[in-house]
Image: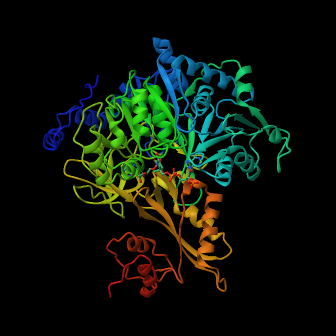
């Protein structure tokens, strides 16, 4: 068993020395996972329930993830929903709280115990089965932060259906792209979500998306929220514009009332549990496919050893079920651990104030808070002296975990000094499913260093490679962060529908490695510092977005000749998308009018989550002689960095307008 979590602050010198001496339990555990991966992971696999326990552990062909030879625990079978629900009830924990819903938007709170959640999940799963959904079928979930989101996910897992949750901040077009790729037969949705300034009606969005898609959807199940009116009959009868009688619109409550409880279906370890779309370098999102057994084993390990969360804990992960953080650390991880998990509908500030998180911690006795750095920056901006924190009893809180984007050192210091619990920055991606680097508090609390995301977790062997793929890993040398294959259990097993795209996106750039798309370096103590992306992905308020998708939308405008979208530094959201455009010849549009149209277009096609506001019209875009737009140079000028103008620039004077707009002057 791991050591009990130590909560004392470990002094920098002693922790670093301990790590170097390789005597702590982190070092031993990590070394075990490297030297005897099969033994290590089979031991961890014992901590979840299998129908057929695996005898095989690591993939026999590490460079072929997604195939039977490339997967973990190849001969094991299990059911994920039985692991997160039935086994806790069977162990006598049926009356423990499982799902705590807290809506700052409606003021409502509710607690479902493990037994109650099991009943709701089994019944809804039965309802899905009655609609003909069976193992391997896809179900798209487009729901706000209400209990039904968790119920729908776990119901799919129960019957072996593959869920694909789409974040509510995406517009109809993005939803349609995901429908076309995953070809779900069922969509589960609600009448809408609640944002601080408006109600977001989901039904017109779903209806429009189905109209834009190629026709796989047969049923739409709608949870009626009393706060948001929505009449399914106009869609059910095909009277809504573009409505179709081929798609049946059903009421969630009616479906649940009439259904018979479904038993868990036996699934192979490598069977897909879900598809989760994330941004890549091109405009079309990548459908990351997660397996069942490997994910269960990895999350079980992470809950105990990284988060120190067990049966008696309550974890509040302030994210959305539409992101991987929501999948792993609102839903599957906490429930695998038998903990209580808080599902929060609201914001860190403004609902009603910067004390929202502290209220939740007090009211639900939260042990662990997990959020994005943006949320802390937002709280800091509103309440720099943490007066709101003093109004609540947050003594239950043991630690705060942050991920999703770089945690700037100022915010780290502010939080560390003011909130008085360990602040754990940790780094991972939709693709990996759980943290690559962290401070494994549950195992051994190591020193935390501002700016670093901690040390590698078992099974992850990150290396620093130069552009040619040479391993240049040594303290202080920055380069591409790549992870030796195989990825540990829990890592993606493919991209939905395209083995070739999977290989091209992650495996071919550095043979033998998984390319993370991030750059960074290790320090002398083996701590990793993640500095940013090497591709065209930007990170806005912890939301991963592709500049390519903005460019695709903006280029559609009839007045736009060329455009370059890049991520500029933003005090609150880390980055924000900014578009630099040239107008077509002869279009003498007022720049501000054109900007308003482009902002509206992006919102309509991608959705409000893009948070797009910045447009700059220029005469010409700076380019190399071979025609490549100098995005990095533009970004450096705007972000106030030292600018390295590439010698291959076609015409250096084109930069002058950009310098002027950024309030700088080009050095001659
Ligand atoms: N459904 C519909 N619209 C949504 C939405 C959802 N689920 N989530 C966000 N939006 C909308 C917002 O209403 C906003 O629309 P607006 O332009 O009409 O105001 C837009 O998308 C941008 O939202 P957001 O990024 O939340 O910005 P904000 O200015 O409203 O709030 C913060 C700022 C810092 C409070 C907010 O960004 C935040 O909570 N950040 C933490 C993010 C986070 O937890 N990320 C986790 C990823 S792991
Ligand atoms: P997502 O797949 O949406 O979770 O985004 C993953 C990306 O977010 C990573 O590839 C990083 O670029 C960034 N990221 C996540 N966590 C961190 C972190 N702790 N520090 C720096 N960047 C991070």
Q: Between 30 and 254, which is closer to the camera in this rendering?
A: 254
Which quarter of the picture shows residue 253? top right
- Residue 420 at x, y = what percent? 26, 38
- Residue at position x 29%, y 22% from top? 1
Tell me: residue 662, above or below residue 38. Answer: below
Q: Is residue 450 visible?
A: yes
With 287 as the anchor, is 471 left or right in this view?
A: left
Q: Is residue 513 visible?
A: no
Task: Give the number of callouts.
Answer: 0
Which coloring applies here?
rainbow
Q: Between 394 and 128, which is closer to the camera in this rendering?
A: 394
- Residue at position x 74%, y 40% from top? 230
Tell me: residue 618, above or below residue 42. Answer: below
With 244 as the anchor, is 653 left or right in this view?
A: left
- Residue at position x 64%, y 48% from top? 178
- Residue 290 at x, y = what percent? 52, 39
- Residue 271 at x, y = what percent? 56, 33
- Residue 448 at x, y = what percent? 24, 43
Tell me: residue 489, above or below residue 81. Answer: below
Q: Quadrant of the C terminus?
A: bottom left
Tell me: residue 150, above or below residue 501. Answer: above
């Amino acid at each position: 068993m791991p050591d009990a979590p130590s909560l004392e602050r470990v002094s920098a010198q002693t922790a670093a020395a301990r790590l170097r001496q390789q005597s702590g339990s982190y070092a031993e555990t990590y070394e075990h996972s490297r030297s005897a991966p099969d033994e290590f992971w089979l031991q961890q696999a014992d901590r979840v329930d299998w129908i057929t326990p695996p005898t095989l552990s690591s993939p026999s062909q590490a460079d072929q993830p997604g195939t039977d030879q490339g997967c973990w625990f190849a001969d094991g079978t299990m059911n994920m929903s039985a692991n997160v629900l039935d086994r806790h009830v069977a162990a006598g924990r049926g009356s423990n709280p499982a799902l705590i819903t807290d809506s700052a938007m409606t003021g409502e709170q509710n607690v479902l115990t493990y037994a109650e959640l099991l009943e709701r999940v089994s019944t809804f799963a039965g309802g899905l089965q009655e609609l003909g959904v069976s193992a391997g079928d896809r179900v798209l979930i487009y729901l706000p932060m209400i209990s039904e989101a968790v119920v729908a996910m776990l119901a799919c897992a129960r019957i072996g259906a593959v869920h694909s949750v789409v974040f509510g901040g995406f517009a109809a077009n993005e939803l349609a792209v995901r429908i076309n790729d995953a070809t779900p037969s069922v969509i589960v949705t609600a009448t809408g979500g609640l944002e601080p300034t408006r109600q977001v009606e989901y039904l017109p969005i779903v209806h429009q998306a189905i109209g834009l898609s190629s026709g796989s959807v047969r049923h739409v199940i709608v949870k009626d929220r009393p706060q948001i009116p929505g009449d399914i009959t106009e869609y059910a009868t095909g009277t809504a514009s573009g409505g179709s009688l081929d798609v049946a619109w059903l009421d969630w409550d009616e479906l649940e009332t009439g259904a018979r409880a479904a038993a868990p279906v036996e699934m192979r370890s490598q069977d897909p549990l879900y598809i989760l779309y994330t941004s890549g370098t091109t405009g079309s999102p990548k459908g990351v496919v997660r397996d069942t057994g490997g994910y269960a084993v990895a999350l079980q390990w992470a809950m105990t050893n990284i988060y120190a969360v067990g049966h008696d804990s309550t974890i509040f992960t302030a994210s959305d079920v539409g992101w991987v953080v929501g999948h792993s650390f609102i839903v599957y991880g906490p429930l695998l651990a038998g903990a209580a998990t808080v599902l929060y509908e609201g914001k860190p500030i403004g609902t009603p104030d910067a004390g929202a998180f502290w209220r939740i911690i007090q009211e639900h006795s939260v042990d662990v808070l997990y959020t994005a750095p943006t949320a802390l920056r937002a709280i800091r901006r509103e309440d720099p002296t943490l007066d709101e924190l003093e109004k609540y009893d947050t003594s239950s809180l043991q630690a705060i975990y942050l991920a999703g984007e770089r945690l700037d050192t100022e915010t780290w210091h502010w939080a560390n000094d003011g909130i008085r619990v360990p602040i754990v920055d940790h780094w991972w991606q939709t693709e990996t499913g759980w943290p690559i680097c962290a401070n494994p508090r549950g195992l051994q609390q190591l020193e935390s260093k501002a700016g670093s995301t901690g040390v590698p977790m078992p099974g992850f062997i990150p290396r620093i490679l130069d552009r040619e793929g040479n391993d240049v890993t040594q303290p202080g040398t920055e380069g591409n962060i790549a992870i030796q294959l195989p990825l540990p259990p829990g890592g993606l097993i493919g991209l939905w529908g395209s083995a070739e795209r999977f290989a091209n996106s992650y495996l071919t750039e550095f043979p033998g490695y998984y390319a993370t798309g991030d750059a960074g370096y290790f320090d002398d103590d083996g701590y990793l510092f993640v500095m940013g992306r090497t591709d065209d992905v930007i990170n806005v308020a912890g939301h991963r977005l592709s500049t390519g998708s903005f460019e695709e939308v903006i280029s559609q405008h009839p007045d736009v000749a060329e455009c370059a979208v890049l991520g500029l530094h933003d005090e609150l959201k880390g980055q924000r998308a900014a578009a630099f455009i040239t107008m077509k010849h002869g279009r003498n549009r007022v720049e501000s009018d054109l900007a308003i149209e482009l902002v509206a277009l992006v919102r309509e096609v991608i959705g409000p989550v893009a948070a797009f506001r910045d447009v700059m019209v220029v005469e010409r875009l700076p380019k190399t002689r071979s025609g490549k737009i100098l995005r990095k140079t533009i970004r450096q000028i705007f972000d106030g960095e030292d600018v390295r103008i590439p010698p291959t620039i076609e015409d250096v004077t084109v930069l002058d307008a950009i310098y002027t707009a950024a309030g700088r002057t080009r050095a001659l």
